[in-house]
Image (cartoon, rainbow, N blue to C red):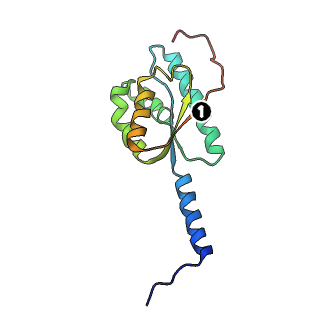
C-alpha cells in the first residue's frame, strides 16, 4: 500500500493539533522565594499559589516550584536556598514549554529567579514577565 497524501484540511488540522500540544505544554512559574524572614517566604508562597491558580483556571498547565516544594521543604526541614534546589528546578524546566517570571518584590535580585532565566535561555525556552499586582501584606525590609 502506498502512502496517501493528506488533504489541505487534514494538514491544517494536524498543524492545529501540534500547535495545541505545544500551547498545552507545562508553564514553569518562577518567582523569588528565599529570604531570612519566614513570613516573607510564606507571603511569596501564598501569592504564587494565587497566580498559579488563576493561570490554571484559564486552562494553562502550570508547574510552580515554590508551590510544590515549599510545603515539602517545611515538612522535611530541607534547605531553602537555590544551591539545594537548582538541579531539581533545572530538571523540571526541561519538561516545560515556557517560563513565566512572576515579578514579585525582589525578583530582580533573586539568585534563584536570575538563574532560572539563565537556564531558560540555555534551554531555548520563551520567557515572559508577569507584573505582580498584589500589594505587600506588610512592610518588609528586603
Where is residue 67? Give x, y as percent: 51, 34
Residue pictured at 53% horizontal, 16% vertical:
39
Q: Is residue 52 left or right of residue 88?
A: right
**Residue of label 1:** 130
Residue pictured at 57% horizontal, 58% vertical:
20
Q: Quadrant of residue 2?
A: bottom left
Where is residue 105? Give x, y as percent: 56, 20
Residue pictured at 37% horizontal, 42% vertical:
91
Where is residue 118? Give x, y as percent: 40, 33
Up/down of 136 relative to 133, above or below: above
- Point out the residue furthest to the bottom here: 1
Q: Secondary structure at mark 1?
A: strand
Mark 1 Cα-neighbour bin, 10 Å: few <14, some 14–19, many ≥20: some
Q: Quadrant of residue 125?
A: top left
Residue pictured at 59% horizontal, 47% vertical:
60
In front of the other: 139 or 38: 139
In front of the other: 75 or 91: 91
Quarter of the image with the N terminus is bottom left
Amino acid at each position: 500500500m502506498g502512502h496517501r497524501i493528506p488533504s489541505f484540511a487534514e494538514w491544517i488540522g494536524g498543524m492545529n493539533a501540534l500547535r495545541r500540544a505545544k500551547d498545552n505544554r507545562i508553564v514553569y512559574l518562577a518567582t523569588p522565594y528565599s529570604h531570612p524572614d519566614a513570613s516573607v517566604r510564606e507571603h511569596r508562597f501564598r501569592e504564587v499559589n494565587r497566580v498559579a491558580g488563576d493561570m490554571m483556571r484559564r486552562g494553562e498547565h502550570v508547574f510552580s516550584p515554590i508551590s510544590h516544594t515549599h510545603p515539602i521543604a517545611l515538612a522535611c526541614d530541607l534547605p531553602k536556598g537555590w544551591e539545594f534546589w537548582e538541579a531539581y528546578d533545572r530538571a523540571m524546566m526541561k519538561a516545560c514549554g515556557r517560563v513565566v517570571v512572576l515579578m514579585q518584590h525582589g525578583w530582580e535580585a533573586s539568585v534563584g529567579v536570575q538563574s532560572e532565566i539563565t537556564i531558560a535561555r540555555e534551554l531555548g525556552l520563551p520567557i515572559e514577565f508577569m507584573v505582580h499586582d498584589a500589594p505587600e501584606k506588610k512592610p518588609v525590609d528586603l
